[in-house]
Amino acid sequence: METFAIELKGVTKTFGSLVANNNVDLSVKKGEILAILGENGSGKTTLMNMISGIYYPDEGHIFINGEEVVIRTPKDAFSHGIGMIHQHFKLVDVFNTVENIVLGLNSGKKYDLSEAKKNIVDISEKYGFVIDPDKKIYEMSVSEKQTVEIVKVLYRGADILILDEPTAVLTPQETEKLFAVLRRMREDGKSIIIITHKMHEVLSISDRVAVLRKGEHIATVETAEASEASLTELMVGKKVKLNIERTEPLNTCVRLSVENISCKNREGITLLDDVSFNVMAGEIFGIAGISGSGQRELLEAIAGLQHIENGSINYLNPKTGETSDLRDHTPIEIREMGVRLSFVPEDRLGMGLVGNMSITDNMMLRSYRRGKSAFIDRKKPHDLADKIISELEVATPDAETPVRRLSGGNVQKVLVGREISSSPALLMAAYPVRGLDINSSYMIYNLLNKQKENGVAVIFVGEDLDVLVELCDRIMVISSGHVSGIVDARSTNKEELGLLMTKAKEQEGSVNE
Amino acid sequence: MNNAKNEKMHEPFVRMVKRDGMSRKKAWLIRGLSIVFALLFCSVVTILLTGQNPIKIYSTMISGAIGTPRRVWLLLQTIAMLLCISLAVTPAFKMRFWNIGAEGQVLIGGLATAACMILIGDKVPAPLLYLFMFLAAIAAGALWALIPALCKAKWGTNETLFTLMMNYVAMQLIRFFIVKWEVPKGSGTIGIINQDSQTGWFPAIGGNLYLLNIIIVFLLCIIMYVYLTYSKQGYEISVVGESENTARYVGINVKKVIIRTMILSGAVCGIAGLLLVGGTNHTIATTTADGRGFTAIMVSWLAKFNPIVMIFTSFLLVFLERGSGEIATVFRLNQAFADIISGIILFFIIGSEFFINYKLIFRHSHKEVK
Amino acid sequence: MLATFIQRAVIQGIPLLFGSTGEIITEKSGNLNLGIPGIMYVGGISGVIGSFLYEQHMGIGTPLNPFLAIAIPMICSLVGSALMGLIYCFLTVTLRANQNVTGLALTTFGVGFGNFFGGSLAKLANSETASIALVRTSKFFSSPIPITKEVSWFTRIFLSYGFLAYLAVIIAILTAVFFKRTRAGLYLRAVGENPATADAAGINVNAYKYVATCVGSAVAGLGGLYYVMDYISGVWSNDGFGDRGWLAIALVIFAVWKPDLSILGSILFGGLYILYLNIPGLSRSSQELFKMLPYLVTILVLIITSARKKRESQPPASLGLSYFREER
């Protein structure tokens, strides 16, 4: 039997009732790059966290070079030569490269930064990193920070490197450089596990691909024998019939017209790239995409929370027939313009609601300014809270219970209930069923459908492709901030969506070899 | 089965987990218990120092605080002043703005009041003088709070350290004016302002000098409660304090709320200064606020920023202070004994919050401990 | 005359230097300990208690053993203030209480503790003396190191102090070296900057916070000891220490969290503190305005550093926050 650099057998991890990984087998050879592919929530990161000592598996065995090991802490992982580069870098901003790299490393040797610096330069030269050992982290670009993380792991003598979505924050050129470095490491006999969503990257860099779906290991295939289509099929799985009711859109007309909007983050990375689309009244407009592809920025730009560089966001007022541009207006200005916009944000307790406030007080968040009085009227919000509690079957002792104490599904009912109560003309919902049980999810689908039947333009950002295909009328797919397609939900299928989600923009094709 | 063993080894003996929430009743029960434990601990300390039996100690304490009518009035007046300053810092804290500059804001408000009494006391009619005193105290306190708030809003300057430093600037300013106005010259104090004419003094109600102050603070307490609980601005303060992201989402201008709230906080501190100088002390010194700007922070925090509960927390602290002061007098200990007792009680109450916010989970048993 | 002025500025600055070095060590771990004024009181009074009992034990006639006369108060002071740091840590680190509230309570307690024992120690110990005057012990603390007998500007500025003054400077320098040149110093800074990262790197965050805060408190407490034993020659007076504790916290900001800078800063602050005495023709009232200078300068530094946003001069990023590793 072949000895693997690392081998997992029957690894299972649960968080409460949620099974993050179920009986996963996985193996990585020496001098191999293994890509792990899977949709959001398929358990990739949890699995890797168990190898790197962040979580401890409920069941299963981990073997390193054929010997069973126990990994309880990141330190244990290090001692077995495993190093993980997380999506969120673990670096101290005011330290320079060298200081960050030696942090936590107690080799028993004399503390000597110049010696460490020499070693770091050696490692960089060996693998072709460009790194300035004296530069402070806060002066660095994202890709430089990532380089520091990788060198840190190598400096500690890791033979197995795990990279969690390393290319998500990189430009195509930076990605190309990273891949060159990874290939050099492979030649040096290192084993590399890379998590990614981007199909072309998988095909370009990996030797084998392991596909996870809903926490389970589906298959591991040789990259040379795989294609985008075959991998997508493995990743999304067979179609599941959900039986969500869907009516034909009636009396549709354009409600929102987004034209050529773009925005960048502080580091200058493009988040939205020339996005244009129309949303019709009376339809559910789905937005699909790998998480972090710009969905949040898009919705926040419409809601007046995100500055955009160019383009326009035009809202057609159904009452007056006038068009108003929402770009760079504050949420209050947008309201004052007569725009009836409701927004169910992704971060329910951190943004949409205040966890420590009662349901009643949360009802007023949007409406408390109404009226000239200096005091708030709690009667109406209280009635509204009671109404939502009874209509949406919110499980709560009363309307004065802090929302923090409700379960996830009930929190979401409160939030969606409030946003719908203001009878919007445009309703945006970001991942409204994430983490909800089946019944609550269906209740949310029904609410959205009812809004659609009432002539509301509904934008639904989702991650479950089965839901998107059955609930929406049209689906826009965004990939790395640009629109890779708008399809008719009735005629599309998961494979088509999956391909669009992982499709790179044409001019970025250079990443492929 | 090797695995099951590993799993247990991984789980630490005791884990702390954040609580989702605890009923208010239970939370106050825990706080009450912590006070009881603290009192027991304090009595052990006192017994060790004095050799008296605990009943004697407690009875001394009670008689010291409320033994005579005069003591009761003194107690009420002291509570009123502490409560007033606590009310002042509360809006800022509710917004998670650590204003520890109340001491300075009170002093500067008192200074403005004294300035009015000294400089224009005999030049304007009494009603106008009261109005000037009131406006000057409010403006001075508000300004003292506004400066750090502006820097916080503009540059993110650390408000804790800034407001702390402002306290000492205020103190030196007072020392400066004391020398300017000192009576008699060279005494280093300004004595009682307008001792003969009593110009600018607050009138005694029913012959009681303290009653007006107590009534004003009581009203202020109600107003602050209503403001924080029922007004739109109070609601905005809560939202900003709980989650700036939510505030942004509903379109609240966070910087505006910070500045507005700090002006309010400083203005109420100014009123406290006004009451101290115009109402009771009729003089100004660096000890006019007497560290209450700091004690108020604890009063407000212990009451979970609820003005009505603050009546009780300020009562608790003042009662202890006066009671242990009496112990010190009777058993001929140093007056600083009161500070030691207050400190110990505070440690206990501060520590008890942990058991309200977290629960301990022990290995194996998974039993919850409060 | 300049030499005399500098000499007096240094004397004023030494308690501040102890206090600020201690607070810098503490703050580098992310703990904003506003209990420093109280801790300095405790440091002072603990030393007083130790040496008072020792003097009592020896009686009036017997000469004191120089080693014990110094060691006993030193150890008492260090232990007393470290215990204060321990209370702070237990409440803020283990019980995750609010740092500001805890610190202020500690100051209330510490100042009370100092004044209480300062005022009633003699009575509690059933001694005949009414007030505490540890003149004999104080001699050991305040006598300058006998290198030379000659008196010049040089000896006045550099050689005229008790040994604690030199210790303050040495500790400050050692602390600066510790931060810059040692592994533990690097780890400590990481804990204050980003405890989650330090934790992930396998550093025991809570242990660092505990040790740094207790050591920092002990160092700050020496400032109180210097004040009673050297500056006021062993005669305790209640509230005599004044607001020097807060000034020490101001000095931390002024020195932008660098102990080596705080050596110069402390002399500057000491100078500003007594500047009014040395400017001729100053009215008494203007003298008071001059005493405002250290605070005004601190505010100015605070505003400038926050406006310039230079990362190296910011407070440790996690200052004032409790660290809690979220378990999923």
Image (spheres, coloured by chain):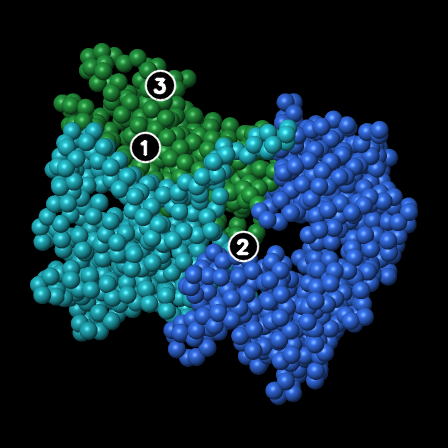
**Residue tagged by mark 2?**
C307
Q: CA distance from mark 1 to mark 2?
A: 37 Å
Q: Which chain is green?
A: C
Nearer the observer: mark 3 or 1; the answer is 1
**Relative to B206, C20 lies left or right:** right
Name which quarter of the figure residue A228 lies in. Answer: bottom right
Circle 1 packing at 10 Å, graded few (<14), some (14-19), many (20+), is many
Name which quarter of the figure residue A292 lies in. Answer: bottom right
Image point 73% across, 41% down: which residue? A24
**Relative to A456, A164 lies left or right:** right
Q: Which chain is blue?
A: A
Q: Are marks 2 and 3 on the same chain?
A: yes
Q: Amino acid at mark 3?
A: Ala
Nearer the observer: mark 1 or 2; the answer is 1
Under circle 1, the secondary element is: helix
Lower sequence index among marks 2 and 3? 3
Disc 2 chain ID: C
Per the rendering, the colour in which chain B appears is cyan
The numbered dot on residue C71 is: 3
**Residue tagged by mark 1?**
C42
